[in-house]
Amino acid sequence: MTSGLARNSRKETGNILLIVLIGIALFAALLFVMGRSNRYDTGATENAALAAQEITSYADKINNAVQNVMNENGCLATQVSFQNTTVGGYTNGAANKCMIFDPAGGALVFQTPPLAAIDTAAATAAGSALAGNYYFEGNACVTNAGTGPPGSACSAANSELLIIMPWVTQTVCEQINWITMKSTTIPTVAAATFDGTQFAGSYGGSFTITTSGTTYPSGCYQSSSSPPGTGYHFYYVLVAR
């Protein structure tokens, strides 16, 4: 005949086992949730990295084409043309051999940025219509890139030829800087930096891209002034002057 002490002992053992099983189940559920969260974060970072790679690779191709038409075709910095069949405003009367998007020149195809990289909300908040395209501009200086700032003020004589992608998302901006600067830190620029003026052969010294730290010939920064407004923007120096 089983004693009361033995029955109590088995009951306590069963309770302990149940508690252990419940604890294991809760721990497994926690690991599952954390795993899903980590996979989501990793996926978002990977997507941003892919978008950043697409943007910087395209800028590299543009840069190579610009150097080719200048060095091999004898085109001047004022003759480089970004005339294309997608976006108007870039016609400057240059010969076909100086056109980046012509078979006789750079032989490239005009592209638009990856949709996932565009911060349309920030552009809308700033009242800007520049989101969704690359811009080729010649009205801004990049500090330390050419003969302009900090040695002298930015002017039409020393402004750079740039490709700019306005309104990049923060995560893509970080990944761009990892590619170009080996750092995900985003520098800030307090002054006006560009306004979307399309390059048609003439330069202007209206704006300056200068950061508090080292300025790179390409990268992504956060602006806090207008134009263009508060947001993140990619730039790449095609011709330093």
Image (cartoon, rainbow, N blue to C red):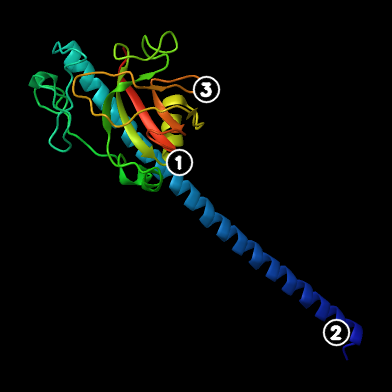
Residue 72 falls in which quadrant of the image? top left
Residue 231 falls in which quadrant of the image? top left
- Left or right of 200? Residue 29 is right
In this figure, what is the number of numbered marks? 3
Closer to the chain start, of discs 1 and 2, is 2
Few, some or many C-alpha atoms within 10 Å of disc 2 (few <14, some 14-19, many ≥20)? few
Distance of label 3 from label 1 (alpha carbons): 21 Å
The residue that appears at 29% across and 19% down in the rendered structure is 204
Please report contact status of discs 1 and 2: CB closer than 8 Å, yes or no.
Answer: no
Q: Which of 187 and 115 is in front in this view?
A: 187
Residue hosting label 2: 7
Position of 132 relative to 192 (above/below): below
| Helix, strand or loop at mark 1 | helix
The residue that appears at 22% across and 25% down in the rendered structure is 199
The three-letter amino acid code for the residue at tag 2 is: Arg
Residue hosting label 3: 212
User: Residue 171, which numbered label?
Assistant: 1
